[in-house]
Amino acid sequence: MSNFKSIVSLQFFFFSSISLLLLIPSCLAYNVVNFGAKGDGKTDSTAPFLRAWMSACSSTSPSNVYVPKGTYLIRPVTFTGPCRSRIEFRIDGTIVAPVDYNVIGGSNFWILFYKVSRLSIYGGTIDAKGHNFWSCRRSGHSCPPGARSITLLWCDNVVVSGLKSLNSQIMNMAIDYSSHVRVEKIRIRSPSGSPNTDGIHIENSRDITITDSIIQTGDDCISIGTGSMNMWIQKIGCGPGHGISIGSLANSLNEAGVQNITVANSVFTKTQNGVRVKSWARPSNSYAKNLIFRNLVMRNVGYPILIDQNYCPDNNCPQQNSGVKVSQVTYKNIKGTSSTQEAIKLDCSQTNPCSGITLQDIKLTFVDPHLKRPALTYCKNAQGTHRGTVLPRSCF
């Protein structure tokens, strides 16, 4: 009997110990409220956020900056690394910018993570309150340049999951000079008329994944700038907005190219463009190559498939030929409706024609209920092949 009691006591001790271990958090938590932040939406909580970050970043154990429920007002802030261990930034509340757009508008960045590795950003909402800034831009008055809502600059090994970004002054999220970044399950929303409010802009970065997200903006849902490579984009709901774009390229003569980009399994709804490669018509040593666009649905989209090497949105056009070389681009299994008669438009450079273009299993129809005109394909200085059924008819 005593042996039985000893075994029971030992089992109880063992399982109790396991339960206690499971209750111990995997990382040290630094609650911004404990550092003086107030979730009333009025009190400036920038300094408390920074104090919480510096404490967490200096920890030798994995740490967590925690933003509990509430509304926290912060000014432009830079969370600087490198940190001594893995770090989380977990948001259960809402972070808002000051109502006066000048407070963040002259800083270029609102929330900046700089030189941070092994970073995870989870959940929550950030609201830059960009409406008054957009009104200033539309009025033609003198305005500050505007701030990106959240930026990763020189960061590595980052996960951004479950974040909601609202009403950015300009770009909602920017990824610059960073690598091994995964963005998932995010929601971006800016009105369709808001200028230059790209959803996610990537530049000079590599090994980037963007997946399972809904992006509604006044500019590109996702824009991929110079020096970007090895990107996987899938399961995106895009619209309203300007679609998913490579470029614009040829902003300068000496410019890094873009390569190894895949956009797959996504839906575009009432966007100005679908999948687009755009470059200015001027000399450049840049390039865009090894691009794959596949398994896409277009719903009343302007120019669902577009290469535009005469890009000129402001009518101040260079009137030259683009030096950007566009090659090895595959469009496969793209179906739906176009709001422009030219459903496929490949307008390439006269001095540097597009090459290696593949159109495969395309079915795009023109939404024209009154005249019932067919969708068309327009090709200029483009070389390639087609496979399977291609509608409108391929020019190759």
Image: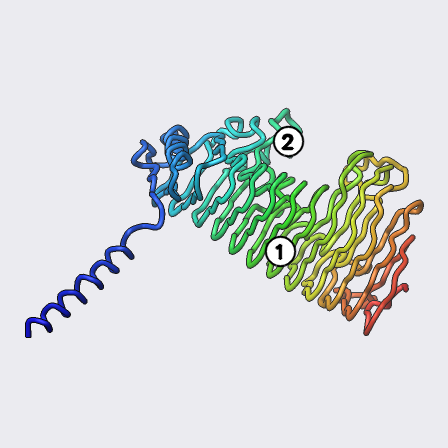
* Horizontal relation, residue 101 to residue 139: left or right: left
Q: Quadrant of the C terminus?
A: bottom right
Tell me which amino acid carries mark 2. Ser
* Horizontal relation, residue 70 to residue 273: left or right: left
- Label drawn at residue 139: 2
Question: Residue 139: x and y, percent?
Answer: 64, 31
Q: Residue at x 64, y 34 (%)?
A: 138
Question: Residue 227: x and y, percent?
Answer: 71, 42
Q: CA distance from mark 2 to mark 1?
A: 28 Å
Q: Quadrant of the N terminus?
A: bottom left
Q: Residue furthest top?
A: 142
What kind of colouring is applied to the model shown? rainbow
Quadrant in the rendering for residue 152: top right
Quadrant in the rendering for residue 268: bottom right
Secondary structure type for disc 2: helix
Q: Residue furthest front?
A: 3
Tell whether label 1 touches label 2 (CB within 8 Å). Answer: no
Secondary structure type for disc 1: strand
In this picture, is 371 found above or below 349?
below
- Label drawn at residue 238: 1
Q: Residue at x 74, y 62 (%)?
A: 338
Q: Residue furthest right?
A: 351
Front-most of residues 344 and 341: 344
The mark tally for this picture is: 2
Question: Residue 286: x and y, percent?
Answer: 80, 42
- Label drawn at residue 131: none
